[in-house]
Image: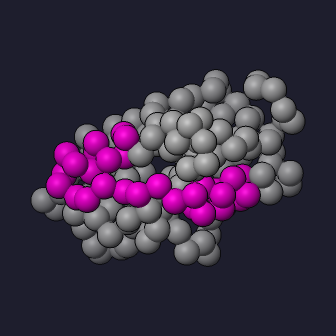
């Protein structure tokens, strides 16, 4: 576990634009997102320090109340992808796990293979999403990315 309080979300983990460390963290999230988006012909996402701060605040509150567990994002105006690992996963690694779901998605029919999940992939490549903000908790490791506007609208194709 990194230095600092257990369960805390650090500024460097949150990403943002205030320092080289924060810019590097933002790039670690943005680059794999935007590679996946380019592969299907949708515009790149922009980093949002506001969304990153919101993600960090949501996870900090979650950790205070229930520990390092997936966050219930019901009622949120944002799209959300979450990832959990038993080790400190790098942001690009977490995003790659979401993008890997794309192998189960069929764009022509806007369907996912039976028994598979495609929702994190379709949120990554959702055409109307324009902004991204992410944070990682220091507990063995929970990642939350928020998207504005949200994707995965029932009955709509992501691209």
Q: Is residue 56 magenta?
A: yes
| Residue 142 pos. (x, y %) | 65, 40
Task: Check the image and tell me how it is coloured.
Answer: one colour
Quadrant of the image occupied by residue 27: top left
- On screen, residue 42 versus residue 148, left or right, reads left
Where is 147 relative to 106, above or below? below
Q: Residue at position x 80%, y 40% from top? A: 7
The count of marks equals 0
| Residue 3 pos. (x, y %) | 81, 26
Q: Main secondary structure of the magenta part?
A: helix
Q: Residue at position x 73%, y 58% from top? A: 57
Q: Nearer the viewer, residue 22 or 61?
A: 22
- On screen, residue 51 versus residue 38, left or right, reads right
- On screen, residue 22 versus residue 69, left or right, reads left
Q: Residue at position x 47%, y 55% from top? A: 47
State the residue lying farthest toward the left: 108
Q: Is residue 58 visible to us here?
A: yes
Quadrant of the image occupied by residue 15: top right
| Residue 43 pos. (x, y %) | 25, 59
The N terminus lies in which quarter of the figure?
top right
The C terminus lies in which quarter of the figure?
bottom left
Q: Is residue 134 visible to us here?
A: no
Q: Is residue 158 magenta?
A: no
| Residue 48 pos. (x, y %) | 52, 59
Stretch of the chain drawn in magenta: 31-59
């Amino acid at each position: 576990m990194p230095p600092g309080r257990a369960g805390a979300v650090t500024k460097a983990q949150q990403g943002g634009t205030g320092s080289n460390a924060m810019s590097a963290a933002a790039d670690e999230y943005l680059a794999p997102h935007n590679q996946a988006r380019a592969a299907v012909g949708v515009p790149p996402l922009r980093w949002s320090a506001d969304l990153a701060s919101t993600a960090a605040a949501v996870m900090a509150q979650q950790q205070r109340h229930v520990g390092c567990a997936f966050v219930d994002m019901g009622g949120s105006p944002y799209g959300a992808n979450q990832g959990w690992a038993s080790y400190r996963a790098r942001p690009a690694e977490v995003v790659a796990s979401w993008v890997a779901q794309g192998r189960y998605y069929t764009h022509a029919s806007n369907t996912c293979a039976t028994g598979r999940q495609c929702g994190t992939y379709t949120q990554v490549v959702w055409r109307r999403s324009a902004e991204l903000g992410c944070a990682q908790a220091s507990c063995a490791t929970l990642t939350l990315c928020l998207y504005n506007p949200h994707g995965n609208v029932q009955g709509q194709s992501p691209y």
